[in-house]
Amino acid sequence: MLGPGLGALHADARPTLIVGIETRGLVLGPITALHLGVGFVEIRKDRRIVGEYRGPAADPLLRAATPPEYQDGGLTLVVPGRLFRPGDRVLLVDEWIETGAQASAVRRMVTEAGAEWIGAAVVVDACAPHVRARLDVRGLLTEDDLPA
Ligand SMILES: O=P(O)(O)OC[C@H]1O[C@H](OP(=O)(O)OP(=O)(O)O)[C@H](O)[C@@H]1O
């Protein structure tokens, strides 16, 4: 029931596109998108792309870096820019959010492409209140709901 549960968190904003970050977002995102009947876009981590692929000139990649201190040196998220269009109402789905660094990077790419950021729907919301408010994070659980 994770798809319906995650899909209900921002139903009021009527998302038209789900994005998910590898790794677990590539599982939870599609089941949420299927439930809502909307499309899905996968966000990859640059360090996990094999080789030097950077995309053809006609299909450039959007890139957004997390802060350098994030996860031992930061990481860069990438997505083909053509997958976002102006008018898309984009919802990020993930299993966990804490600092909001990866979600912030995704939001920059979404808005750079002219699409609209709706927020983040997560299984566990472990972020600080200011992060929750800034990114419009909604969760099925908080850390307090988890066994110690
Ligand atoms: O709010 P943040 O501090 O940005 O953390 C949240 C991110 O961290 C986890 O990914 P992780 O990098 O652990 O992905 P993995 O499953 O590929 O190891 C999680 O899936 C989120 O994408």
Image (cartoon, rainbow, N blue to C red):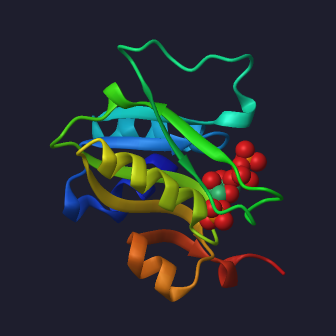
- Using the image as rendered, state which of residue 107 and residue 18 is in the foreground: 107
The residue sitting at the left extreme is: 87
- x and y, in percent, of residue 27 in the image: 58, 37
Q: Is residue 120 above or below residue 47?
A: below
Q: Residue at x 40, y 81 (%)?
A: 133
- x and y, in percent, of residue 34 in the image: 37, 34
Q: Residue at x 49, y 61 (%)?
A: 104
Q: Quadrant of residue 77?
A: top right
- Is residue 32 something that shows in the picture? no
- Using the image as rendered, state which of residue 46 and residue 57 is in the foreground: 57
Q: Residue at x 58, y 57 (%)?
A: 102
- Is residue 5 something that shows in the picture? yes
Q: Residue at x 69, y 49 (%)?
A: 75
Q: Is residue 40 above or below residue 21?
A: above
Q: Answer left or right for 84 relative to 26.
A: left
Ligand 1 quarter of the rendering: bottom right
